[in-house]
Amino acid sequence: MKRAAASVVFALIMTSATHAEDLAPLKDAGPYVPSPQSVVSDMLRYAGVGPNDFVIDLGSGDGRIVRTAAKVFGARGFGVEIKEDLVRQANQAAVREGIADRAKFYQRDLFKTDLSQASVVTMYLLPDTVNLLKDKFLAELKPGTRIISHDYPLTGWLAEKDRVFDLQEKVAISGVTTTILWLYIVPAKVEGRWAVELPAGMAKRPAVLDLKQNITNVHGWLHLDGDEVPLQAIKLRGERISFELAGRKAQFSGEVKGGVIEGAVQAGRVRGPWSAKLVE
C-alpha cells in the first residue's frame, strides 16, 4: 500500500510538472553543475532558512537544495530545471524521502517562472545568467526576500554579507578550492517624493523627503523649513530604512509599507514618531 500511495503522489507531481505552461520553449541557462552537498547546507544556513520559508531554487538539478531545505530546515519550496531527466530524478527522490508534499520540481524556463511566492531564492548559475535575472528579482520578489548565490554576485547590488572559504570538492567543478556565498536582501522601492510628518518642535512647515534609488543604494534630501538637508548613513534592508541628517543630530528609522513609511526619529531632545506618504 505504501508503494502504491507513493506511485500516486509521484504521478500527480509529474502531471503538474508537464502542464502546458511548463512545456513552453525553454532557455538553457548553462550546463548542470551541482553544488557540493556541504555548500548546500551552508547556503541554507547562511540565508537563515527555517520552517516558515518558501524556497525557490533556480536551476535545481537533482533537487538537492530544496530537498535539504525541506528535510533539514523544515521549509517548503520548489525547484525549476531545464533537463527532464533531472526533474524526474528530483521528484522521485522527494517521494522516497517522504517530502513530496513540501518539495516539488518542474521542467520550466527559469526566466519565465513566477518567483513571487519565494521568501528565499537560491541559485548556482553562470555569471551572465545571474545578472540577467536582476530585473526579474526586483519586479517579482517581495521586499525582504533573501537571495543566496553560489560563487557569482549580482552586479550593482550591495550584498548583505558574503562568505569566502576553501572547499576541496570545488576543484573538480571550477579548478580551484575558492567558494563564495553571496547573500542579498530585496529592497523596498523608496524612490520618489514623500510628504513628511515630524514630531512637534522639529519643523515649522511641512517637510518633504526626496529619495533617489539604484537597487540597494539610496541617496536623498530632506526639505526642512526652507533648507535642503542631505541625508547620510542611509541603509535600506528589505523594508527597513534608516538615515541621518548631515550636519544635524537627527537619526531616522522606519518601515516601508508600499507608499507609506512609519518610524521613529531622535533629534536632540526631541524624540517621537515620524511618517511619510509617497506623493510623486
Image (cartoon, rainbow, N blue to C red):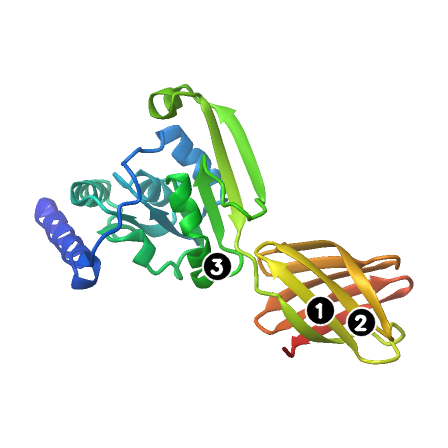
Residue type, numbered disc 1: Asp
Residue type, numbered disc 2: His
Left or right, residue 273 beside residue 1: right
Whether residues under marks 1 and 2 lie with C-beta atoms below 8 angstroms apart, the answer is yes
Label 2 to label 3, Cα distance in Å? 29 Å
Q: How many marks?
A: 3
Whether residues under marks 3 and 1 lie with C-beta atoms below 8 angstroms apart, the answer is no
> Would residue 51 be visible to someone looking at this image?
no
Residue 187 place in picture, x, y as percent: 56, 57
The quadrant in which residue 141 appears is: bottom left
Q: Which mark is residue 138?
A: 3
Q: Which mark is residue 19?
A: none
Left or right, residue 177 beside residue 192: left
Residue 80 place in picture, x, y as percent: 28, 49
Q: Earlier in the sequence, mark 2 or mark 3?
A: 3
Residue 1 place in picture, x, y as percent: 8, 48
Q: Residue at x 49, y 41 (%)?
A: 153
Q: Residue at x 71, y 69 (%)?
A: 210
Residue 275 place in picture, x, y as percent: 71, 73
Label 1 crowd (10 A; few <14 / some 14-19 / many >=20):
many
Q: Earlier in the sequence, mark 3 or mark 1?
A: 3
Can you identify the residue that label 2 sits on? Answer: 223
Label 1 to label 2, Cα distance in Å? 8 Å
Q: Secondary structure at mark 3?
A: helix
Can you identify the residue that label 1 sits on? Answer: 210
